[in-house]
Amino acid sequence: MRLGAVINTTSQWGPNGTLIALERASRAQGYAVISFSHDDGTDQIVKAGTAELMRQGVDGICVIGPRKSTATAMAGLDLGIPIVVVGGTPLPGVISIDIDQAQGAADATRHLLALGHRKILHLSGPLDSSVGAARQEAWRHVMEEAGGDARQVEGDWSSDSGYRLGSDSRLMGDCTAVFAANDQMALGLIHGLASRGQRVPVDVSVVGFDDMPGAAHYLPSLTTVRQDLASLGENIVANIIGVIESYGDERWADAIPATLIERGSTGRFT
């Protein structure tokens, strides 16, 4: 009656929020959660964490915040228990579950386009991250369809990387809007813009992703994409228990829809 979680970078709201949701959903089904956290993200560390959890007798394992190669690495393990990877490419032997990252990123980009913005910069997460890559690919696809001016700067999920972009006029160029791949980077970006006298949304519109606690109280309040982490946690647990109790099988679960939350950090381009 124990589930294991391997979580990358607990300082990020997305992975940490997913872990909290997993713990709550597990408790509701009578299971406890044991976690192995790390900041490395390499497949070797993920495998080491998995081995540690196996020694503690877990009945299933969930990998949160994986690199793109992690699903392949996990699929090669024969553990005899169900494995869930949150995001990543569907592979036999691994249950892949996630928020619909592509839909959320596309909605954020279309929101900015609908406001008249055409020069939309994307502050991406690390592109070796399955989540970062999915959001970046969706942004680029929508921008190419619209014929917009698409430029990208790769961040590291931290507020500091957002601040570095916002405070650097050379990196910002003449973009009128930024889609940041998470709220933490969006927060740093707004700070960086303010440090050189740029106003949000008068001079630059900003959209984040996550709707982390406090996003509504940024100054200005942050337009962002909400992830339904409670549903994500429930889906993870339901799939693991389904395999444990032999009424489910390893599969690609339906992606959970994301929701665009419009607030004060985006405005019409004039």
Image (tube, helix red, strand yellow):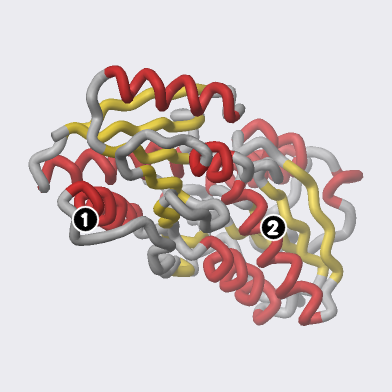
Rendered residue at 65%/31% (across/down): 160
Q: Amino acid at mark 1?
A: Gly
Residue 61 image offset from top left, x and y in percent: 34, 37
The quadrant the N terminus occupies is top left
Instruction: Tally the numbered discs.
Output: 2
Q: Position of residue 31 (x, y in %)?
A: 14, 38
Q: Is tag 1's residue or tag 2's residue first in the polypeptide sequence?
A: 2
Q: Is residue 256 visible?
A: no
CA separation, marks 1 and 2?
33 Å
Side of 41 where 18 appears, left or right = left
Residue 157, x across and y down, in percent = 61, 38
Dot label at residue 136: 2
Residue toward you, 231 or 198: 231
Q: Is residue 185 left or right of residue 224?
A: right
Q: Say the numbered circle drawn on residue 242.
A: 1
Eye-nearest disc, 1 or 2: 1
Height in image: 229 above or below 126? below
> From what the image shows, is residue 46 above or below residue 133?
above
Callout 2, which amino acid? Gln
Q: Is residue 79 left or right of residue 92?
A: left
- Determine crowd level at label 1: few under 14, some 14-19, many 20+ residues with C-alpha closer than 10 A: some
Q: Which mark is residue 165?
A: none
Q: Is residue 266 above or below residue 270?
A: above
Task: Work out whether residue 214 or residue 10 is closer to the camera in this orientation and state it.
Answer: 10
Q: Is residue 260 visible?
A: yes
Give neighbour class at mark 2: few <14, some 14-19, many 20+ (Cα, 10 Å): many
Q: Residue at point 48% right, 69% down?
A: 260
The residue tagged with tag 1: helix, strand or loop? helix
